[in-house]
Amino acid sequence: MEYYGKRNLYTFIDEEIKANQSSPPRLCLKSDCQISDHDHVPYSPSRSTTSTPNSNMYSLMPPPCPDSPWTLSPLQTPSPSLLHHCIASLRRQEGTIFSITVSRGLVFTGSESCLIRAWRQPDCTERGNLRASSGDVRAILAYGNILFTSHRDNKVRMWNINVSENFQAKKVNTLPKRSSFLIFPRTNTQKHKDCISCMAYFHAEGLLYTGSWDKTVKAWRVSDNRCVDSFVAHDDSVNAIVVNQEDGCVFSCSSDGCVKIWRRVYGQSSHTLTMTLKFQPSPVNALALNTSLNSCFLYSGSSDGLINFWEKEKMSSRYNHGGFLQGHRFAVLCLVAIEKLIFSGSEDTTIRVWRREEGSCFHECLAVMDAHRGPVRCLAASVETEKHVVKGFLVYSAGLDQTFKVWRVKVLPEEKKVGNIEGGDRIDTNIKISEYEMSPVLSPSWVGKKLQANHPFH
């Protein structure tokens, strides 16, 4: 299988959408069950002709918020053999969702529009929205009551969020600030020259890291809104950044196929490269860090469908390659690590749930969620508790099919699941391998283009 990158991916998406659109887009609200065979929806599976559903069926669905283009879709029936089920599905008309973040009981989504929407956990009732002058919210990050968003103008905006009963949000800063020398305008050297694709925040030092398609990483000191360091990190676009909150190490990945580890020079603001991790020529699209008292694992998702992982040595602090997780058919576009679980979203439209065995590098795939009708673009997850006891996990996903879904994941004790998971996973894998080419989940024309492509990603 050849390797592909994000610009090729969007080229396929744009071509598919243009091929299917014969009329201007309509601003109508529809649920999954209301979309007819004549509606042009990218990646929609073929449907058999059925009779028109009874109108009483729709009266059971809650009406959409008058200020929102979202509407609830019918809930999927949970399968008794799986550890998850979809509790809400929302279809939008504002374009692709590029980023999701969770903080203090709220879920924030950023998309192609100029609105950043806030949703209440876990039912995804809309709480409000933030309006920015520039759209295309490519990256979004929340910490406490501060929300960071990156926009089309290659700038970052900081918002102060009030999560009380009456949701309020106020823009407090823009990074970098506009130059005060209006008489002699000059190029702002602190500004990224291309799209800001990812962000990470180091809590202890108050440093915001931004990665861009211009191949650079910048460090911003939030206290005085200054760019304290800027360096060329990769030979191609930077796709993801994560920070180890324990020691301040910064991890970046790129379409050049590398994962790099950076550390701040002692007593200074500059950063130095400490390690380069590269095990395949494929573009690396996503990173996730899983830390605990006894271990630290770094995960990277690449366009060959693999998830490589490295374990940190306690004595030397080096990261040793531990292996890879194999299962996705196309590129891995997003990763989330929480507790012992790793969630991976892929271009093959699925989300896989992996669990690492305590005290070892062994991982098992607990479930495969047939999530969307298009590539899964972004993920977020949080722990769901009741009276300080962990009940499970809430997972939020968005795909290029313009839907936003909420999943409830419950993990049973390992001794009760090992036998069932192994047997179920073997059956599921065999079915997927034998029936993949005729799967109705993917648009046939898009799959054909994907398999015939012969030029690399940007």
Image: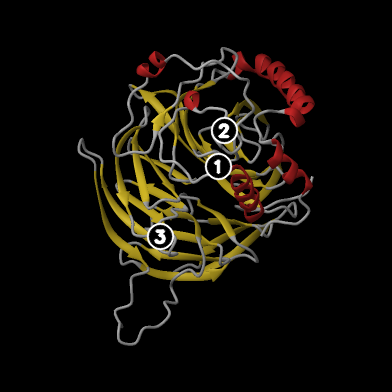
- Which one is in front in this view, the residue at disc 3 or the one at disc 2? 2
**Circle number at residue 207:** 3
In the visual, does 160 lie left or right of 431?
A: left
Image quadrant where residue 126 sits: top left
Tell me the CA gap for discs 3 and 2: 35 Å
Q: Residues within 10 Å of mark 2 (few under 14, many from 20)?
A: many
| Label 2 with label 1: CB-CB less than 8 Å | yes
Nearest to N terminus: mark 1 or mark 3: 3
| Picture coordinates of residue 386, whole percent (x, y) | 35, 22
Tell me the CA gap for discs 1 and 3: 31 Å
Report the residue that reaches farthest toward the bottom: 184
Residue behind mark 1? 400
In this picture, is 3 found above or below 434?
below
Q: Name the quadrant of the N terminus.
A: top right
Which sits in the foreground, 245 or 445?
445
Residue behind mark 2? 372
Q: Residue at 76% of width from left, 50% of height from top?
A: 453
Q: Amino acid at mark 1?
A: Leu
Q: Residues within 10 Å of mark 1 (few under 14, many from 20)?
A: many
Is residue 312 shown to the viewer in this render?
no
Q: Amino acid at mark 2?
A: His
